[in-house]
Image (tube, grey):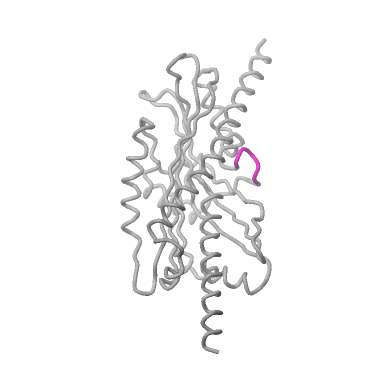
Amino acid sequence: VSTMAFTRQRSSRALELLLLLSIAHICIIDAFLPRQWVRVDPKNLFSSCGSLSASTASSVEETVDQASLVLRADYVGESSPAPVTSQEAMVDFFRDPKHSSCLITAANTRESHVVPSNDELLTKWKKRASILGAAEPKESDVIISVRTGGIKFPGVTVESTSLIGSTVLLPTESNPFPSYEFVLIQDQREASGLKPIVWVFNQLVGVGNKDREKDAALMSLSRVAPYPTVVDPEKITFKIESFLEIKVKFPSVLLKILPVSKEKAEAQGADAVRKVLAKDIDVSIEKFRNIYVESLQLEQQFSS
């Protein structure tokens, strides 16, 4: 009897760990996003992200009963070249919420809408922006709600709704182009399906428990800007630089059934996340570029 009980207990722990890692994977995939706008050479981006990772890593506390997994990923995506336009026209293009939403909805493949701001959301946004080194939001900046389609697992379907702060940074004397910063403000996940598995999911992510909800922390910052091409100064490319981190706390006993070490699990997880980011970001930035080119063509038609 004791052997059967032990087997059931091990199976239960394995199920919990599977759901836990799946939830972490969902969080990472569905909320990509960036850091204070400074002209940074792409080859130096990862070293600057490393300093951010080091600072956030110190906030992960582990105890005898609690362990954590920390997954971090960086990615730089670049569009194909496009014609340059006037500074005024570029600013107008960046200020249109439809254009910014394309970048955070995997090229308009996810449901999204602008939500009204309030004191609570603005406070969260400012706090996240300060932690990530992003610009403080202005009254003209908007919050976009992005909802993913249902991701199905055996017995359960998980959906995620993310609130993302979208900031337009205007040109300066040293930077002739506008740019975007996207800060993840908050993320909420919902599960539906078999009640026992939904219950396990809610226990893992702490639904309804503010202290437990903090155990699954997601930080994300992305920035998007045009850069003149080296070959032709009359051409630009759009670059997106993204940083993403997820920290999940769970009972330390679950470490015993990990098939690899904690460090290797984090490294493998970060590599998998980076590949997913690359796929979504490359599609989004090229779609953004195409919308920009179409807007220039329409403008030329009207002016001719």
Q: Outermost residue, bottom direction?
A: 1
* Closer to us: 255 or 44: 255
* Residue at 57% from the left image edge and 68% from the top image edge: 201
In the rendered structure, the answer to whether residue 40 lies left or right of residue 77 reads left
* Residue at 43% from the left image edge and 51% from the top image edge: 245
In the rendered structure, the answer to whether residue 55 lies left or right of residue 34 reads left
Q: Outermost residue, top direction?
A: 304
Q: Is residue 256 above or below residue 26?
A: below
Residue 174: x %, y % from top left: 35, 24
* Residue at 62% from the left image edge and 37% from the top image edge: 107
Q: Quadrant of residue 227?
A: top left
Residue 77: x %, y % from top left: 49, 34
- Residue 301 belongs to magenta span: no
* Residue at 35% from the left image edge and 61% from the top image edge: 60
* Closer to us: 34 or 116: 34
Residue 83: x %, y % from top left: 54, 17
Q: Quadrant of residue 157?
A: bottom right
Q: Is residue 85 above or below residue 241?
A: above
Residue 207: x %, y % from top left: 55, 68
Q: Is residue 123 above or below residue 138?
A: below
* Closer to us: 147 or 119: 147
Give the extent of the magenta segment: 106-110
The quarter of the image holding the C terminus is: top right
- Residue 108 belongs to magenta span: yes
Count of numbered circles on the image: 0
Residue 34 makes an appearance in the image: no
* Closer to us: 93 or 277: 277
Residue 265 makes an appearance in the image: yes
The quarter of the image holding the N terminus is: bottom right
Our reading of the magenta stretch's main secondary structure is loop
Q: Is residue 209 above or below residue 185?
A: below
